[in-house]
Amino acid sequence: MGEDYNMIKFKRKVLLRAPLLTVSGYGVHCRQIFDYLYSRNDLDLTVQVLNWGSTPWIVDRHSEDGLIGKIMMCSKQIKEKFDVSVQVQLPDEWDESLAHHNIGVSAFVETDICNPMWLDKVNKMNEVIVPSNFVKEVVFNTGNVKKNIEVIPEHYNYNIDKKQNKENFHFDKKFNFLILGQLTGDNPDNDRKNIENMIKWYCEEFKDNRNVNLILKTNSGRCSLNDRSRTVARVSEIVDRNRKGKYPTIDVLHGNLTSKEIASLFKNNKIKCLLSATRGEGYGLPLVDAAASAMPIVVPAYSGHMEFLEKENICSLNYKMSQIPPNRIDARIFMKDSKWAEVDGDDFKNKIRDVFENYTAYRKKAQRMQQRVRNNFSRESVFEKYDQFFEKYLG
């Protein structure tokens, strides 16, 4: 005589500890990981929301297609040990006692070496995930690494694939360059994104040119009205120092944009080219978004963004490796004797002029690169990589 039994499916208890709600590149990366874990129906997911420096938080639960609300719903008090923890933090903040299996996730640092003290934490975790082979090489170049370091990239903004976005921006000029990044500090030599120098070089190269415009999506660390006033004043001061007359023009976009609004920038047919004189990237989300949109990119062929970019299909900037300034050393993140890329200003000016005058050729290069990026760095392809990685822990 048979008897029916209800099959009980036990769900793995997973903790995601990360700055999930912050307006930052780390925040976007964290939300991508949450999106993956939440999409699985075999997990009991808890999140612990952390700060990321002084960056502001997204508090509208309906934002990002409701993803923010899902994060808030999964935020619970920690009362027990988990099967798996995923900790998206700097390595010295990882805690190897939170779960039976502990996964550290970090972009580490954008220079050629990281803090040697971080390697002790690396070796105490079960495994570590980094977004690019560049970061992996930085860690191995620093010292003795005993644990596996897995490269799982970040995916491009999936709103780029959608045919229409409600949010849109309207610009007067037909040819606009685009820069995205936080305007930090008062010393251009210390700014990893190198934004002040890019404004300077743009003003010098297109002096008196009425047919070109620069769109600068930036802030000074906050999304408040006070921060907006401070940021606009800072940009105006940089422009006044380097521009004679009224041209070339610059539009400042300030504040937090949704992922849909960011996608609409990259899909705007008047925005022709993304500029980045970065001194180093762990990955570079604006760059992968531009590549997925077939937007020409001016950038040095160095650091994390070369995970998805192809040197022959970008406008590659000349650079040299240079020691970071002494006042940038902080004994935690930026180490003494570490180096980053220093872009040649004259070459930057020559390259942006060349893109302006020969746009069609650079657009064709970008189109050649686009399909590879869409095939290998989409949400679906990155989720497949997470499936393969987590099989040993969650399968």
Image: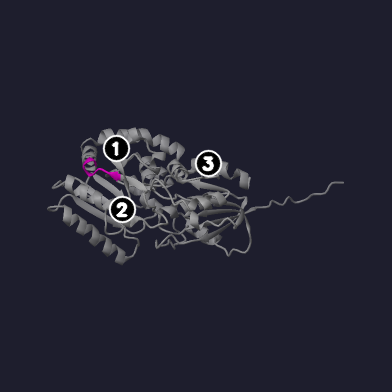
- Is 179 left or right of 335, judged from the image as shown? left
Q: Which of marks 2 and 1 is in front?
A: 2
Numbered tag placed on residue 325 in the rendering: 2
Q: Name the residue under label 3.
A: 385
| First in sequence: mark 1 vs mark 3 | 1
- Quadrant where the C terminus sits is top right
| First in sequence: mark 2 vs mark 3 | 2
Residue 171 drawn at (x, y percent)? 25, 50
Q: Name the residue under label 1.
A: 315
Label 3: how many Cα within 10 Å (few below 14, some 14–19, many 20+)? few
Residue 16 drawn at (x, y percent)? 54, 55
SS of the residue under disc 2: loop
Name the amino acid type tagged 1: Cys
Q: Give whichever of 369, 344 is nearer the camera.
A: 344
SS of the residue under disc 1: strand
Does the magenta-highlighted stretch encompass residue 259?
Answer: no
Quarter where residue 224 is shown = bottom left
Name the amino acid type tagged 2: Pro
In the displayed structure, 200 sits above or below 221; it is above
Quarter where residue 146 is shown = top right
